[in-house]
Image (spheres, grey):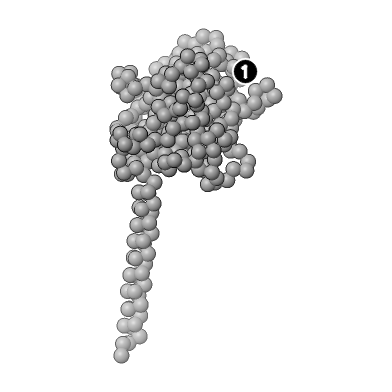
């Protein structure tokens, strides 16, 4: 007959074994979940399966300027890029923000200048997440939330709408239709959009929404004389521009190039102007923006 001490040791070993098994199952399930949410490979087959953008994600008549994919506006956006691209912005900015005392703020709508609406670019699942801390300015609170739309046709792919205000009534996990209103930004605020998918091994595949936009969705810009390639700088062309960043990594500022001579109204370098800026700096008293302008 076993002694109480032997029984206690046996139960202790059994408890340790069960804990190890539980940890193994938990870790295994998380790895399996991560694997299901990540592309195993990325090549021509996966490229052909990228969901099309069937609705532009913003009010076309309210976005007066856009940055092309692979520009050097804003900050470097190449975090864990799958093919090693760095020191360029693998997303798009629409319009540009204004700052007070060096900090971004949410501009308020007026009867003549309503908020800019944001729309689901395809059928998918809606979710949000808080904006992370800006490593370039940790003391500055980011405005708004990220709105994430996961494509229904291929759940590997998501569109991120940064610094957005949400629409009341939309819940986490809600199914949304292409063109459905999902958020807003202020009338004087920028929009920022990224199109991406996780790749097995911790890398991220980035794409431009304009590389996958349908002719019907792009039609408002076609009427203005643009093509989807108008808003995409090729990798080779971006390499030839020799952008310079502050340091290594996928989220960093570009090396300052000194003050920019700016007309009235100010036309910012790096932007493609679609229509005149309705909020030229010369008419905005007491506000400064994130470019050096003299």
Left or right: residue 117 compared with residue 245: right
Residue lying furthest right in this view? 111
Which of the two residues, 245 or 174, is positioned nearer the viewer here?
Answer: 174
Q: Mark 1 falls on what kind of element?
A: loop
Q: Position of residue 69 (x, y in %)?
A: 40, 25
Q: Position of residue 218 (x, y in %)?
A: 48, 23
Classed neighbour count for the residue bearing mark 1: other residues with Cα under 10 Å, few (<14), some (14–19), many (≥20): few
Residue lying furthest bottom in this view? 1
Q: Position of residue 54 (x, y in %)?
A: 49, 31
Left or right: residue 136 compared with residue 102: left
Q: Is residue 171 above or below residue 267?
A: below
Per the image, the residue denoted by label 1 is 285
Q: Position of residue 97 (x, y in %)?
A: 54, 25
Residue 139 visible, this angle? no
**Which quadrant: the N terminus?**
bottom left
Residue at horizontal 49%, vertical 11%? 262
Residue at horizontal 50%, vertical 33%? 121
Q: Quadrant of residue 104?
A: top right
Residue at horizontal 54%, vertical 28%? 58
Which of the two residues, 264 or 119, is positioned nearer the viewer here?
Answer: 119
Residue 24 visible, this angle? yes
């Amino acid at each position: 007959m076993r002694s109480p001490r032997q029984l206690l040791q046996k139960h202790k070993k059994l408890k340790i074994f069960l804990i190890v098994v539980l940890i193994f199952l938990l870790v295994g399930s998380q790895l399996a979940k991560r694997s299901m949410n990540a592309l195993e490979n990325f090549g021509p087959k996966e490229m052909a399966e990228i969901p099309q953008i069937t609705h532009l994600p913003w009010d076309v008549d309210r976005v007066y300027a856009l940055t092309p994919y692979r520009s050097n506006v804003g900050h470097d956006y190449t975090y864990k890029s799958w093919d090693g691209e760095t020191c360029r912005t693998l997303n798009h900015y629409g319009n540009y923000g204004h700052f007070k005392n060096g900090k971004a703020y949410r501009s308020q709508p007026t009867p003549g200048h309503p908020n800019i609406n944001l729309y689901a670019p395809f059928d998918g699942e809606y979710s949000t997440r808080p904006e992370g801390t800006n490593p370039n300015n940790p003391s500055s609170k980011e405005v708004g939330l990220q709105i994430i739309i996961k494509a229904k046709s291929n759940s590997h792919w998501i569109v991120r709408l940064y610094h957005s205000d949400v629409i009341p009534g939309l819940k986490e996990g809600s199914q949304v239709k292409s063109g459905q209103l999902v958020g807003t930004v202020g009338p004087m605020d920028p929009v920022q959009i990224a199109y991406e998918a996780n790749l097995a091994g911790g890398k991220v595949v980035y794409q431009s929404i304009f590389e996958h936009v349908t002719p019907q969705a792009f039609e408002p810009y076609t009427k203005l004389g643009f093509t989807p390639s108008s808003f995409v700088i090729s990798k080779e062309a971006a390499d030839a521009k020799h952008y310079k960043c502050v340091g290594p990594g996928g989220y960093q500022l570009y090396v300052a190039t000194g003050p920019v001579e700016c007309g009235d109204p100010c036309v910012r370098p790096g932007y493609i102007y679609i229509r005149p800026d309705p909020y030229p700096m010369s008419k905005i008293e007491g506000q400064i923006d994130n470019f050096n302008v003299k």
